[in-house]
Image (cartoon, rainbow, N blue to C red):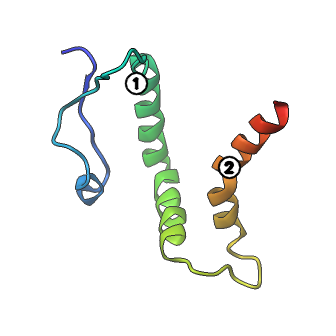
Amino acid sequence: MENTYVICAKRDHRLRSCKPNPITLQTEKDLALPNPDYLRIHAVCCKVAHLSGAAEHMDKVLEGLEYMRVLSEDGSSAHILSFALQPFSQEIGAEARG
C-alpha cells in the first residue's frame, strides 16, 4: 500500500508510544506527504549510525537531556547543551534572514 511504512527501533521499548506497525501516512488537508525517497535515505542513515556506534552515542546524549537538571561546572556537559539548542538555532537563523 502506498505511504505505508514499518517503524522499527534498536530497542523495542522505544516503540511503545508508536501506533501498531505498519503505519500509513495520510492527511485530511491538501498537504504533501513525506517524500518516500527521503524516508528511505533517513532509514539508511539510521542503520549506518547504528552500525558505526554513533546511535549509541546519540542515545547517551538524549538520555543526558532527559535526566540532566543542571549543567556541570567544568563544561563537560557542553555537548548536551549544544545538542539541545541546535533546533532553535535554525529557527533564529531563519528569522534573521527575514
Q: Amino acid at mark 1?
A: Arg
Describe the element under mark 1 as helix, strand or loop: helix
Quadrant placement of the C terminus: top right
Please identify the quarter of the rendering in which residue 47 is found: top left
Quadrant placement of the N terminus: top left
Assess disc 1: are there few (<14), some (14-19) or many (≥20) residues with their C-alpha within 10 Å of its C-alpha: few
What is the number of the mark on residue 88? 2
**Relative to 54, is 29 on the left or the right?**
left
Residue placed most toward the observer, 51 or 93:
93
**Relative to 43, is 96 on the left or the right?**
right
Assess disc 2: are there few (<14), some (14-19) or many (≥20) residues with their C-alpha within 10 Å of its C-alpha: few
**Relative to 82, is 98 on the left or the right?**
right
Please identify the quarter of the rendering in which residue 61 is found: bottom right
Where in the figure is residue 2, as x and y percent of width and height?
A: 24, 14
What is the number of the mark on residue 40? 1
How many numbered badges does the structure rendering display?
2
Residue at image position (28%, 23%) is 26
Describe the element under mark 2 as helix, strand or loop: helix
**Relative to 73, is 32 on the left or the right?**
left
Labels 1 and 2: the sequence-earlier one: 1
Residue 1 drawn above or below residue 11: above
Where in the figure is residue 70, as x and y percent of width and height?
A: 63, 81
In the image, farthest residue toward the bottom: 73
Q: Amino acid at mark 2?
A: Phe
